[in-house]
Image (cartoon, rainbow, N blue to C red):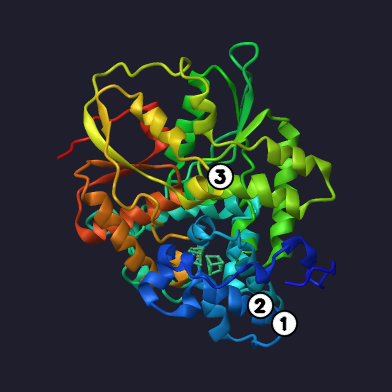
Amino acid sequence: MTTDSKTSDLGLRTSDLKVDYSACVRCGTCLAGCPTYEELKDESFSPRGRVALGSSLDSGRLPVSAGTGRHFSTCLLCLACEANCPNGVKTESIILGSRRILQEKKGIPLLKRAAFKNVLGSSISRRAIFPFLPAAKILKNREGRLKPWQVLKPFLYKIDPERSYPLPDIKDTPEINLPPLEAGRPRIFIFSGCLGDIFYPRIREAAVSLIRKTRAGVILPRERICCGLPLSAGGDEKGARALARRNLEIISRYQPDLIVSPCPSCARFLKGELPRLLEEDSLALEIGKKVVDLSEYLVSKPDLLPRPEKKLSGLLTYHDPCHLARGMGISKEPRSLLSRLPGIDLSEHTERSRCCGFGGSFAFEHYDLSRRIQAKKVESLAQTGAGLVVTSCPGCIFQIEDGLIRAGKPMKVAHLYEVLDNPPNSKSK
Ligand code: SF4
Ligand code: SF4
Protein backbone atom coordinates (compact mmCIF):
# COMPACT_ATOMS: atom_id res chain seq x y z
CA MET A 1 0.00 0.00 0.00
CA THR A 2 1.30 3.43 -0.73
CA THR A 3 2.75 5.17 2.28
CA ASP A 4 2.47 8.79 1.22
CA SER A 5 -0.62 10.54 2.49
CA LYS A 6 -3.21 11.16 -0.20
CA THR A 7 -6.94 11.45 -0.11
CA SER A 8 -9.11 9.89 -2.78
CA ASP A 9 -12.41 11.33 -3.93
CA LEU A 10 -14.13 8.92 -1.55
CA GLY A 11 -12.24 10.34 1.41
CA LEU A 12 -9.94 7.35 1.81
CA ARG A 13 -6.63 8.31 3.37
CA THR A 14 -4.27 5.68 2.10
CA SER A 15 -1.64 6.63 4.69
CA ASP A 16 -4.06 5.29 7.33
CA LEU A 17 -3.64 1.78 6.07
CA LYS A 18 0.03 1.55 7.07
CA VAL A 19 0.74 -1.83 5.59
CA ASP A 20 4.05 -3.24 4.53
CA TYR A 21 3.85 -5.99 1.94
CA SER A 22 7.58 -6.65 2.20
CA ALA A 23 7.11 -7.94 5.78
CA CYS A 24 5.75 -11.13 4.22
CA VAL A 25 8.67 -13.48 3.67
CA ARG A 26 6.37 -16.10 2.08
CA CYS A 27 7.15 -18.69 4.73
CA GLY A 28 3.59 -20.11 4.59
CA THR A 29 3.14 -20.49 8.36
CA CYS A 30 -0.23 -18.76 8.05
CA LEU A 31 -1.66 -21.28 5.59
CA ALA A 32 -2.39 -23.93 8.21
CA GLY A 33 -4.94 -21.86 10.14
CA CYS A 34 -6.75 -20.23 7.21
CA PRO A 35 -10.27 -21.69 6.85
CA THR A 36 -10.70 -20.63 3.23
CA TYR A 37 -7.37 -22.12 2.17
CA GLU A 38 -8.25 -25.29 4.03
CA GLU A 39 -11.46 -25.62 2.01
CA LEU A 40 -10.30 -24.38 -1.40
CA LYS A 41 -6.68 -25.61 -1.38
CA ASP A 42 -5.72 -22.74 -3.63
CA GLU A 43 -2.81 -20.42 -2.86
CA SER A 44 -4.71 -17.41 -4.19
CA PHE A 45 -7.33 -17.94 -1.45
CA SER A 46 -4.70 -18.15 1.30
CA PRO A 47 -3.32 -15.30 3.43
CA ARG A 48 0.05 -15.47 1.67
CA GLY A 49 -1.65 -15.41 -1.72
CA ARG A 50 -3.90 -12.49 -0.72
CA VAL A 51 -0.89 -10.48 0.46
CA ALA A 52 0.78 -11.02 -2.93
CA LEU A 53 -2.41 -10.20 -4.81
CA GLY A 54 -2.97 -7.10 -2.64
CA SER A 55 0.50 -5.85 -3.53
CA SER A 56 -0.16 -6.41 -7.24
CA LEU A 57 -3.54 -4.69 -7.05
CA ASP A 58 -2.06 -1.74 -5.20
CA SER A 59 0.69 -1.27 -7.78
CA GLY A 60 -1.76 -1.58 -10.67
CA ARG A 61 -0.34 -4.86 -11.98
CA LEU A 62 -3.58 -6.72 -11.19
CA PRO A 63 -6.76 -5.54 -12.93
CA VAL A 64 -9.91 -4.61 -11.03
CA SER A 65 -12.40 -7.33 -11.91
CA ALA A 66 -14.98 -9.63 -10.33
CA GLY A 67 -12.38 -12.41 -10.36
CA THR A 68 -9.90 -10.26 -8.46
CA GLY A 69 -12.59 -9.20 -6.00
CA ARG A 70 -13.43 -12.80 -5.14
CA HIS A 71 -9.97 -13.41 -3.64
CA PHE A 72 -10.62 -10.64 -1.12
CA SER A 73 -14.39 -11.02 -0.54
CA THR A 74 -13.86 -14.69 0.42
CA CYS A 75 -11.69 -13.68 3.37
CA LEU A 76 -13.56 -14.01 6.68
CA LEU A 77 -11.37 -11.43 8.44
CA CYS A 78 -11.01 -14.08 11.13
CA LEU A 79 -7.46 -12.95 12.04
CA ALA A 80 -6.12 -16.52 12.28
CA CYS A 81 -3.35 -15.63 9.82
CA GLU A 82 -2.25 -12.60 11.83
CA ALA A 83 -2.18 -14.70 14.99
CA ASN A 84 0.06 -17.29 13.28
CA CYS A 85 2.38 -14.99 11.35
CA PRO A 86 5.88 -14.79 12.84
CA ASN A 87 6.56 -11.52 11.00
CA GLY A 88 3.54 -9.55 12.16
CA VAL A 89 2.11 -9.09 8.66
CA LYS A 90 -1.07 -7.02 8.85
CA THR A 91 -3.15 -9.26 6.61
CA GLU A 92 -6.43 -7.72 7.70
CA SER A 93 -5.29 -4.21 6.70
CA ILE A 94 -4.03 -5.52 3.37
CA ILE A 95 -7.35 -7.21 2.62
CA LEU A 96 -9.40 -4.20 3.72
CA GLY A 97 -7.17 -1.89 1.73
CA SER A 98 -7.59 -4.07 -1.34
CA ARG A 99 -11.35 -4.04 -0.92
CA ARG A 100 -11.24 -0.25 -0.77
CA ILE A 101 -9.28 -0.06 -4.01
CA LEU A 102 -11.82 -2.37 -5.66
CA GLN A 103 -14.73 -0.45 -4.22
CA GLU A 104 -13.39 2.87 -5.49
CA LYS A 105 -13.31 1.46 -9.00
CA LYS A 106 -16.38 -0.77 -9.00
CA GLY A 107 -18.56 0.62 -6.20
CA ILE A 108 -20.32 -1.33 -3.46
CA PRO A 109 -23.44 -3.32 -4.49
CA LEU A 110 -26.42 -1.00 -4.36
CA LEU A 111 -28.57 -3.22 -2.13
CA LYS A 112 -25.74 -3.77 0.34
CA ARG A 113 -25.08 -0.07 0.56
CA ALA A 114 -28.78 0.70 1.00
CA ALA A 115 -29.18 -1.99 3.67
CA PHE A 116 -26.32 -0.82 5.85
CA LYS A 117 -26.37 2.90 5.18
CA ASN A 118 -30.00 3.79 4.61
CA VAL A 119 -31.80 1.16 6.69
CA LEU A 120 -29.53 -0.14 9.46
CA GLY A 121 -27.60 3.13 9.54
CA SER A 122 -30.63 5.33 10.13
CA SER A 123 -32.73 5.29 13.27
CA ILE A 124 -35.66 6.79 11.32
CA SER A 125 -35.65 3.96 8.75
CA ARG A 126 -35.21 1.37 11.48
CA ARG A 127 -38.29 2.63 13.28
CA ALA A 128 -40.25 2.78 10.02
CA ILE A 129 -39.29 -0.68 8.72
CA PHE A 130 -38.56 -2.80 11.77
CA PRO A 131 -42.15 -3.01 13.06
CA PHE A 132 -43.07 -4.84 9.86
CA LEU A 133 -40.33 -7.47 10.07
CA PRO A 134 -42.11 -9.68 12.63
CA ALA A 135 -44.81 -10.18 9.98
CA ALA A 136 -42.21 -12.40 8.30
CA LYS A 137 -43.30 -15.06 10.83
CA ILE A 138 -45.95 -16.15 8.33
CA LEU A 139 -43.03 -17.65 6.36
CA LYS A 140 -41.75 -19.80 9.21
CA ASN A 141 -41.24 -23.51 8.77
CA ARG A 142 -41.98 -26.43 11.12
CA GLU A 143 -38.91 -25.74 13.24
CA GLY A 144 -40.08 -22.18 13.79
CA ARG A 145 -37.31 -20.82 11.55
CA LEU A 146 -37.48 -18.63 8.48
CA LYS A 147 -36.71 -20.01 5.04
CA PRO A 148 -37.63 -17.00 2.99
CA TRP A 149 -36.03 -18.04 -0.27
CA GLN A 150 -39.07 -18.74 -2.41
CA VAL A 151 -40.96 -15.58 -1.51
CA LEU A 152 -38.18 -13.07 -1.11
CA LYS A 153 -35.61 -14.27 -3.62
CA PRO A 154 -36.23 -11.47 -6.12
CA PHE A 155 -35.85 -8.77 -3.50
CA LEU A 156 -33.16 -9.82 -1.08
CA TYR A 157 -29.45 -9.66 -1.42
CA LYS A 158 -27.83 -13.06 -1.92
CA ILE A 159 -30.32 -15.14 0.02
CA ASP A 160 -29.41 -18.79 -0.06
CA PRO A 161 -32.18 -21.38 -0.39
CA GLU A 162 -30.65 -23.60 2.27
CA ARG A 163 -30.03 -21.11 5.05
CA SER A 164 -32.62 -20.82 7.77
CA TYR A 165 -33.02 -17.73 9.90
CA PRO A 166 -34.29 -17.17 13.40
CA LEU A 167 -37.54 -15.21 13.52
CA PRO A 168 -37.07 -11.45 13.85
CA ASP A 169 -37.85 -10.41 17.40
CA ILE A 170 -37.81 -6.65 17.17
CA LYS A 171 -38.58 -4.53 20.20
CA ASP A 172 -38.46 -0.77 20.08
CA THR A 173 -37.07 -0.48 23.61
CA PRO A 174 -37.50 2.98 25.12
CA GLU A 175 -34.30 4.71 26.21
CA ILE A 176 -32.78 3.30 29.38
CA ASN A 177 -30.63 5.73 31.34
CA LEU A 178 -30.32 4.58 34.95
CA PRO A 179 -27.76 6.02 37.36
CA PRO A 180 -25.50 3.70 39.41
CA LEU A 181 -27.11 2.15 42.47
CA GLU A 182 -23.96 2.77 44.49
CA ALA A 183 -21.35 5.53 44.54
CA GLY A 184 -18.19 4.65 42.64
CA ARG A 185 -19.89 2.34 40.14
CA PRO A 186 -19.52 3.21 36.43
CA ARG A 187 -22.20 4.25 33.97
CA ILE A 188 -22.08 1.62 31.23
CA PHE A 189 -23.31 2.28 27.69
CA ILE A 190 -24.64 -0.72 25.74
CA PHE A 191 -24.08 -0.68 21.97
CA SER A 192 -26.50 -3.40 20.98
CA GLY A 193 -25.48 -4.03 17.32
CA CYS A 194 -27.75 -4.76 14.33
CA LEU A 195 -27.96 -8.56 14.32
CA GLY A 196 -28.71 -8.70 18.03
CA ASP A 197 -31.24 -5.90 17.68
CA ILE A 198 -33.17 -7.69 14.94
CA PHE A 199 -32.98 -11.33 16.04
CA TYR A 200 -31.83 -11.51 19.66
CA PRO A 201 -33.04 -8.52 21.73
CA ARG A 202 -32.99 -10.88 24.71
CA ILE A 203 -29.17 -10.51 24.69
CA ARG A 204 -29.25 -6.77 25.28
CA GLU A 205 -31.94 -7.31 27.94
CA ALA A 206 -29.58 -9.73 29.68
CA ALA A 207 -26.81 -7.10 29.43
CA VAL A 208 -29.02 -4.52 31.13
CA SER A 209 -29.93 -6.99 33.87
CA LEU A 210 -26.33 -8.13 34.44
CA ILE A 211 -24.99 -4.59 34.65
CA ARG A 212 -27.74 -3.71 37.12
CA LYS A 213 -26.77 -6.68 39.28
CA THR A 214 -23.32 -5.11 39.66
CA ARG A 215 -25.05 -1.93 40.85
CA ALA A 216 -23.61 0.05 37.93
CA GLY A 217 -25.51 2.63 35.89
CA VAL A 218 -26.79 1.49 32.51
CA ILE A 219 -27.48 3.33 29.27
CA LEU A 220 -29.29 1.88 26.26
CA PRO A 221 -30.19 4.61 23.79
CA ARG A 222 -33.36 4.42 21.73
CA GLU A 223 -31.37 5.60 18.72
CA ARG A 224 -29.41 2.51 17.73
CA ILE A 225 -27.70 2.36 14.35
CA CYS A 226 -25.09 0.23 12.60
CA CYS A 227 -21.51 0.78 13.84
CA GLY A 228 -20.17 1.06 10.29
CA LEU A 229 -18.16 -2.16 10.16
CA PRO A 230 -20.08 -3.78 7.25
CA LEU A 231 -19.50 -0.74 5.05
CA SER A 232 -15.87 -0.48 6.11
CA ALA A 233 -15.29 -4.19 5.53
CA GLY A 234 -16.92 -3.86 2.10
CA GLY A 235 -14.50 -1.08 1.20
CA ASP A 236 -16.84 1.91 1.67
CA GLU A 237 -14.71 3.96 4.03
CA LYS A 238 -16.66 7.15 3.42
CA GLY A 239 -19.97 5.50 4.35
CA ALA A 240 -18.36 3.92 7.41
CA ARG A 241 -17.01 7.29 8.50
CA ALA A 242 -20.47 8.87 8.32
CA LEU A 243 -21.88 6.14 10.60
CA ALA A 244 -18.91 6.45 12.96
CA ARG A 245 -19.56 10.21 13.21
CA ARG A 246 -23.23 9.64 14.06
CA ASN A 247 -22.37 7.00 16.66
CA LEU A 248 -19.80 9.32 18.21
CA GLU A 249 -22.54 11.93 18.60
CA ILE A 250 -24.98 9.45 20.14
CA ILE A 251 -22.48 7.95 22.61
CA SER A 252 -20.96 11.30 23.62
CA ARG A 253 -24.38 12.64 24.52
CA TYR A 254 -24.50 10.24 27.48
CA GLN A 255 -20.87 10.63 28.66
CA PRO A 256 -20.55 7.00 29.78
CA ASP A 257 -17.61 5.64 31.79
CA LEU A 258 -17.53 2.35 29.87
CA ILE A 259 -18.95 1.12 26.55
CA VAL A 260 -19.80 -2.53 25.98
CA SER A 261 -21.38 -4.46 23.12
CA PRO A 262 -22.81 -7.99 22.96
CA CYS A 263 -21.18 -8.07 19.49
CA PRO A 264 -17.36 -8.12 19.63
CA SER A 265 -17.10 -7.04 16.00
CA CYS A 266 -18.99 -3.83 16.87
CA ALA A 267 -16.92 -3.40 20.04
CA ARG A 268 -13.64 -3.83 18.18
CA PHE A 269 -14.79 -1.38 15.52
CA LEU A 270 -15.75 1.24 18.11
CA LYS A 271 -12.49 0.68 19.96
CA GLY A 272 -10.07 0.76 17.02
CA GLU A 273 -11.71 1.84 13.77
CA LEU A 274 -13.93 4.67 15.00
CA PRO A 275 -10.92 6.60 16.40
CA ARG A 276 -8.98 5.94 13.19
CA LEU A 277 -11.80 7.09 10.94
CA LEU A 278 -12.39 10.23 13.01
CA GLU A 279 -8.79 10.92 13.92
CA GLU A 280 -9.31 14.67 13.71
CA ASP A 281 -11.71 14.45 16.67
CA SER A 282 -10.05 13.86 20.07
CA LEU A 283 -13.40 12.73 21.44
CA ALA A 284 -13.23 9.68 19.15
CA LEU A 285 -10.03 8.48 20.82
CA GLU A 286 -11.59 8.97 24.26
CA ILE A 287 -14.64 6.94 23.24
CA GLY A 288 -12.38 4.18 21.86
CA LYS A 289 -10.52 3.92 25.16
CA LYS A 290 -13.76 3.35 27.05
CA VAL A 291 -14.73 0.25 25.04
CA VAL A 292 -14.35 -3.01 26.97
CA ASP A 293 -15.92 -6.43 26.79
CA LEU A 294 -18.50 -6.86 29.53
CA SER A 295 -16.72 -10.06 30.62
CA GLU A 296 -13.59 -8.00 31.42
CA TYR A 297 -15.64 -5.77 33.69
CA LEU A 298 -17.53 -8.64 35.32
CA VAL A 299 -14.37 -10.65 35.98
CA SER A 300 -12.99 -7.70 37.90
CA LYS A 301 -16.12 -7.61 40.10
CA PRO A 302 -16.49 -11.26 41.18
CA ASP A 303 -18.40 -10.49 44.34
CA LEU A 304 -20.95 -8.27 42.70
CA LEU A 305 -22.71 -10.92 40.66
CA PRO A 306 -25.18 -12.81 42.86
CA ARG A 307 -24.85 -16.59 42.92
CA PRO A 308 -27.66 -18.43 41.12
CA GLU A 309 -30.62 -19.24 43.37
CA LYS A 310 -31.53 -22.51 41.70
CA LYS A 311 -29.39 -25.64 41.68
CA LEU A 312 -27.58 -26.00 38.37
CA SER A 313 -26.26 -28.97 36.51
CA GLY A 314 -25.04 -29.39 32.97
CA LEU A 315 -22.22 -29.49 30.53
CA LEU A 316 -21.49 -26.67 28.17
CA THR A 317 -18.80 -25.65 25.74
CA TYR A 318 -17.59 -22.18 24.87
CA HIS A 319 -16.97 -20.95 21.31
CA ASP A 320 -14.46 -18.08 20.95
CA PRO A 321 -15.66 -15.38 18.53
CA CYS A 322 -12.66 -14.42 16.34
CA HIS A 323 -13.00 -10.69 16.96
CA LEU A 324 -13.17 -11.19 20.72
CA ALA A 325 -10.43 -13.80 21.19
CA ARG A 326 -7.96 -12.75 18.50
CA GLY A 327 -9.24 -9.22 17.92
CA MET A 328 -9.49 -8.09 21.54
CA GLY A 329 -7.49 -10.76 23.36
CA ILE A 330 -10.45 -11.89 25.47
CA SER A 331 -10.80 -15.65 25.92
CA LYS A 332 -10.01 -16.38 29.57
CA GLU A 333 -12.57 -13.97 31.00
CA PRO A 334 -15.74 -15.67 29.65
CA ARG A 335 -14.41 -19.07 30.79
CA SER A 336 -13.58 -17.71 34.21
CA LEU A 337 -17.14 -16.37 34.58
CA LEU A 338 -18.68 -19.66 33.41
CA SER A 339 -16.50 -21.68 35.78
CA ARG A 340 -17.96 -19.76 38.70
CA LEU A 341 -21.44 -21.16 38.03
CA PRO A 342 -21.83 -23.98 40.56
CA GLY A 343 -22.83 -27.30 39.02
CA ILE A 344 -21.90 -26.25 35.47
CA ASP A 345 -18.99 -28.02 33.76
CA LEU A 346 -17.12 -26.54 30.84
CA SER A 347 -15.93 -28.97 28.18
CA GLU A 348 -13.51 -27.50 25.64
CA HIS A 349 -13.93 -28.58 22.03
CA THR A 350 -10.86 -29.55 20.04
CA GLU A 351 -11.16 -26.76 17.48
CA ARG A 352 -11.82 -23.91 19.85
CA SER A 353 -9.90 -21.33 17.81
CA ARG A 354 -11.60 -22.30 14.54
CA CYS A 355 -13.84 -19.63 13.00
CA CYS A 356 -17.54 -20.59 12.78
CA GLY A 357 -17.69 -19.40 9.16
CA PHE A 358 -19.96 -16.38 9.71
CA GLY A 359 -17.76 -13.39 8.85
CA GLY A 360 -20.69 -10.93 8.47
CA SER A 361 -21.59 -10.46 4.80
CA PHE A 362 -19.33 -13.43 3.97
CA ALA A 363 -21.95 -15.88 5.26
CA PHE A 364 -24.48 -14.53 2.77
CA GLU A 365 -22.23 -13.83 -0.20
CA HIS A 366 -20.41 -17.16 0.02
CA TYR A 367 -22.85 -19.41 1.82
CA ASP A 368 -21.53 -22.59 0.28
CA LEU A 369 -18.01 -21.93 1.56
CA SER A 370 -19.40 -20.57 4.82
CA ARG A 371 -21.31 -23.76 5.56
CA ARG A 372 -18.32 -26.00 4.82
CA ILE A 373 -16.36 -24.08 7.47
CA GLN A 374 -19.43 -24.10 9.73
CA ALA A 375 -19.76 -27.90 9.46
CA LYS A 376 -16.29 -28.48 10.90
CA LYS A 377 -16.97 -26.18 13.82
CA VAL A 378 -20.34 -27.82 14.53
CA GLU A 379 -18.82 -31.30 14.46
CA SER A 380 -16.17 -30.25 16.95
CA LEU A 381 -18.77 -28.67 19.24
CA ALA A 382 -21.02 -31.74 19.09
CA GLN A 383 -18.18 -34.09 20.04
CA THR A 384 -18.08 -32.55 23.54
CA GLY A 385 -21.49 -34.03 24.35
CA ALA A 386 -22.51 -30.66 25.81
CA GLY A 387 -26.13 -29.60 25.71
CA LEU A 388 -25.33 -25.94 25.30
CA VAL A 389 -22.89 -23.89 23.24
CA VAL A 390 -22.09 -20.56 24.85
CA THR A 391 -20.48 -17.76 22.89
CA SER A 392 -20.15 -13.99 23.03
CA CYS A 393 -21.36 -12.90 19.60
CA PRO A 394 -24.83 -12.76 17.98
CA GLY A 395 -23.24 -13.50 14.59
CA CYS A 396 -21.70 -16.73 15.88
CA ILE A 397 -25.06 -17.69 17.44
CA PHE A 398 -26.79 -17.06 14.09
CA GLN A 399 -24.23 -19.20 12.26
CA ILE A 400 -23.90 -22.04 14.77
CA GLU A 401 -27.69 -22.36 15.16
CA ASP A 402 -27.99 -22.79 11.41
CA GLY A 403 -25.19 -25.39 11.40
CA LEU A 404 -26.65 -27.38 14.29
CA ILE A 405 -30.06 -27.51 12.59
CA ARG A 406 -28.43 -28.54 9.32
CA ALA A 407 -26.46 -31.31 11.08
CA GLY A 408 -29.46 -32.45 13.17
CA LYS A 409 -27.65 -31.85 16.47
CA PRO A 410 -29.91 -31.17 19.45
CA MET A 411 -27.62 -28.59 21.07
CA LYS A 412 -28.79 -25.11 22.02
CA VAL A 413 -26.79 -21.90 21.61
CA ALA A 414 -26.82 -18.93 23.98
CA HIS A 415 -24.91 -15.72 24.55
CA LEU A 416 -22.66 -15.50 27.58
CA TYR A 417 -24.75 -12.64 28.96
CA GLU A 418 -27.90 -14.78 28.92
CA VAL A 419 -26.17 -17.66 30.67
CA LEU A 420 -24.68 -15.46 33.37
CA ASP A 421 -27.91 -13.59 33.92
CA ASN A 422 -30.11 -16.65 33.99
CA PRO A 423 -27.96 -19.79 34.25
CA PRO A 424 -29.57 -22.79 32.56
CA ASN A 425 -29.88 -26.38 33.60
CA SER A 426 -28.45 -27.66 30.33
CA LYS A 427 -29.10 -31.26 29.44
CA SER A 428 -25.96 -33.08 28.45
CA LYS A 429 -24.30 -36.35 27.60
S1 SF4 B 1 1.82 -13.61 5.99
FE1 SF4 B 1 3.31 -14.12 7.61
S2 SF4 B 1 3.03 -16.33 7.96
FE2 SF4 B 1 2.04 -15.85 6.00
S3 SF4 B 1 3.64 -16.26 4.44
FE3 SF4 B 1 3.77 -14.06 4.97
S4 SF4 B 1 5.32 -13.95 6.59
FE4 SF4 B 1 4.70 -16.12 6.44
S1 SF4 C 1 -8.35 -13.51 7.90
FE1 SF4 C 1 -8.92 -15.72 8.06
S2 SF4 C 1 -9.89 -16.22 6.08
FE2 SF4 C 1 -8.78 -14.25 5.79
S3 SF4 C 1 -6.77 -14.84 4.99
FE3 SF4 C 1 -6.56 -14.69 7.22
S4 SF4 C 1 -6.93 -16.77 8.00
FE4 SF4 C 1 -7.68 -16.71 5.87
In the rendered view, tell whether residue 308 sits above or below residue 87.
Answer: above
Spatial CA distance of label 3 from label 1 is: 32 Å
In the rendered view, tell whether residue 179 sits above or below residue 153.
Answer: above
Q: What amino acid is found at the position of numbered circle 1 in the picture?
A: Ser
Residue visible at 51% across and 55% down in the picture? 83
Residue that extends furthest to the top in the rendered view of this protein: 183
Q: Earlier in the sequence, mark 2 or mark 3?
A: 2
Query: Mark 2 and mark 1 in contact (Cβ < 8 Å)?
Result: yes
- Quick check: 18 left or right of 399? right
Quadrant holding the C terminus = top left
Q: Element at badge 2?
A: helix
Residue 375, position as x, y percentages in the image: 29, 62
Label placed on residue 328: 3
Nearer to the camera, 196 or 174: 196
Q: Element at badge 1?
A: loop
Q: Please identify, in this view, whether the residue under mark 2 or under mark 3 is nearer the observer.
A: 2
Is residue 332 at all visible to an observer of this figure? Answer: yes
Residue 191, position as x, y percentages in the image: 59, 40
Residue 409, position as x, y percentages in the image: 20, 53
In terms of image quadrants, where is residue 267?
A: top right
Nearer to the camera, 109 or 74: 74
Q: Which residue is mark 2?
A: 55
